[in-house]
Amino acid sequence: MAKAKIKVIEKNEGPKIEYEQDGTRIYFGDDEIMINCAKYQKDWPLSLDICKDRGGNLTIGTESALRYVAQLEIPAAEYEEHGEGEEATREKLPLDMSEVTLTLWSLE
C-alpha cells in the first residue's frame, strides 16, 4: 500500500516547501528532513508539525519555530484479527499513504 499518494492541502497562496514522497517516507526541502510515516504511526491519529526556525532550518515540532511550513496528519494504525479466543492474534496492517494528509503553508 505504500505506493499510494498522500493527500495535499495548500492552506494559503504563495510558494511552498518542496517535498517528495518515496513509499512511506516524505522528504522536505533539500533532503533537510525525512519523516517515515509508518515509523511514526501510533494506535491513535498523530499530527507532526514541520517548521522553520530563526536560522532558516527545518524542525519537527513548534518549540523553536518561527513559522509553520507543513503538517503531516497520520491516521491511527489498523489491525487485523486472526484466530479466536486465546489463540487470537492481531496483525498491524501496512500504512495506507492515501490516508495521510500533508498541509502546506506559504514560505513567505
Image (cartoon, rainbow, N blue to C red):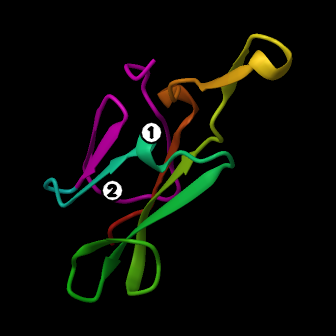
Q: Which residue is mark 1?
A: 38
Residue type pointed to by label 1: Ala
Task: Classify 101 as above or below 56.
Answer: above
Relative vertical location of residue 90 with respect to residue 54 in this rendering, above or below: above
Could you tell me which secondary element the residue under label 2 belongs to?
A: loop
Give the quarter of the figure containing the C terminus.
bottom left
Kindly indicate the quadrant of the structure image that contains residue 90.
top right
The disc, 2 or 1, on the residue closer to the chain's N-terminal end is 2
**Residue stretch rendered in magenta on the structure:** 1-28
* Left or right relative to 72: residue 52: left
Residue placed most toward the observer, 31 or 43: 43
Quadrant in which residue 75 is drawn: top right
Query: Of helix, strand and loop, which one carries label 1?
Result: helix
Q: Which residue is mark 2?
A: 16
How far from the left and from the top, in percent, is residue 83?
Answer: 75, 10
- Please give the name of the residue rendered at 32% of the width and 28% of the height, measured from the top-left corner: 23
When the figure is inspected, residue 84 is found, relative to residue 56, above or below; the finding is above
Residue lying at 45% horizontally and 73% vertically, measured from the top left: 61
Work out whether residue 29 or residue 74 is closer to the camera in this orientation and state it: 74
Residue visible at 42% across and 26% down in the picture? 5
Tell me residue 33's x, y (percent): 25, 59
Q: Amino acid at mark 2?
A: Lys
Q: Is residue 37 magenta?
A: no
Distance from disc 2 to disc 1, alpha carbons, whole Å, reads 24 Å
Is residue 11 one of those drawn in magenta?
Answer: yes
Q: Residue at x 48, y 29 (%)?
A: 97
Q: Nearer the viewer, residue 1 or 73?
A: 1
